[in-house]
Amino acid sequence: MSSKRSPRRQFLKNGAALASFAAGAISSSSGKLFAADVPSADLHAYGQRSRFENDVRIGSLALWPIVPGARRDYGFRSPLQDSMGIITPASLHFIISHGHEPPDIDSRDHQLMIHGMVDRPLIFTLDEIKRLPSVSRLHFLECHGNSAAAGITGEPRKLTSATVQDTHGLTSCSVWTGVPLTLLLGQVGVQKGASWIVAEGSETGRHTKSIPLEKAMDDCLLAYGQNGEALRPEQGYPLRLLVPGWQGINNVKWLRRIYVVDQPYMAMMESTKYPSPRLDGKSRWFESEMGPKSVITRPSGGQQLGSRGFYEITGLAWSGGGAVRRVEVSVDGGRTWKDAQLQQPIVPKAHTRFGLSWTWNGEEAMLQSRCTDDQGHVQPTLAELSKYWGVDADYFRLPPTTADMGNFNSIQPWKVSRDGSVSNALL
């Protein structure tokens, strides 16, 4: 039932474009695949997946300056339709880089400066940070623009043909290793009156984000590891800020500076890109926490049921406000619901895998799921979300430059036709 967005041959053809984000591949005369930058004699030095597995990220980084006619997307989307469990491999984790390629940073030269309203401004090397007590935490990351009704930005809105990778591929979940930010803030001594931090990256453009000090002192992490190894360059190597449960824009990569201040800086992403506009002319600033969300990954858009009979309906659920408490699944368009089984582990601010046994009788079906978190918040329908925004459903059909799709966590329906084909039925 897996939906393969790119066959092996097409993937190899486009390998050069993906070389800086995933292990490249070339084909030998024997048909075997080798890492493009690893000699064949050293294939066992760093593991490679089977040549029969071909799920890849799709999208583009929308690099600046804009190239006329080039495909532009928010970033590279994770193939959720092929996901297993809740951990996303680092090589398939979604990518957002705000229009710039990842910088090439030697970790031996990298430094983090913490200054501003502190008693002792300090500069830390990565080695000094690694000498401190570390923790490992399981958390999801999600782009503010994930689950947009339109699917991929900049392409015709072929809504019915959208896959779960198109609609929800800008979220991933990993085990992150690093040092709690509170530990370093304690070393510099935060002064009375400080209420915000400003985090800055090292890439071209110096992405900057203001974060309330309360959140920084709660559960923020200075991460240098992902899934048991060093961060990949596209994930912020050698050091990134992790802000669990909040919009991905807050998780500053290639972290080089933290400035402790008494008010938000209202940098570009805060003053022009990420306020949530309404049709009444008002905007909401600092809508940071991601709401409860779930999506069925199998069966889902672009997949095909081979015959009548038993299937497990499975998918992912998450919430920026805490842990997933309940996931319900409907096969009749929301008229009736059944509780899905939640797989362990169930961790706050992390993906949770759910499943429900289902026997398809060959008739048309409408599959959807809804998540409830441990704060009692329930994933909304499209009608409920539209009412919250003060718009009607047609608002979400507007071009992305007109309609803000941020924090879109509406219930996602998939239509199963009598021929077994599965399509997007959101709008």
Image: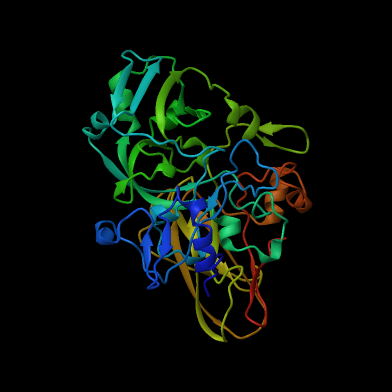
From this viewpoint, is residue 106 visible? yes
- Determine the residue located farthest toward the front in the rendered image: 29
The spot of residue 296 in percent (x, y) is 54, 65
Q: How many marks?
A: 0
In the image, residue 342 above or below residue 129: below
User: What residue is at 57 percent from the left and 32 percent from the top?
Assistant: 286
Q: How did the renderer colour the structure? A: rainbow
Left or right relative to 36: residue 297: right
The spot of residue 57 in percent (x, y) is 51, 56
Q: Nearer the viewer, residue 10 or 288?
A: 10
Name which quarter of the figure residue 266 lies in. Answer: top right
User: What residue is at 60 percent from the left and 57 percent from the top?
Assistant: 167
In the image, residue 20 above or below residue 297: above
Work out which quarter of the rendered image holds the C terminus and state it.
bottom right
In the image, residue 103 above or below residue 33: above
Name which quarter of the figure residue 402 lies in. Answer: top right
The spot of residue 374 in percent (x, y) is 46, 51
Q: Nearer the viewer, residue 177 or 347?
A: 177
The spot of residue 22 in percent (x, y) is 43, 53
Name which quarter of the figure residue 201 lies in. Answer: top left
In the image, residue 155 above or below residue 205: below
Q: Nearer the viewer, residue 115 or 327?
A: 115
From this viewpoint, is residue 327 visible? no
User: What residue is at 56 percent from the left and 45 percent from the top?
Assistant: 61
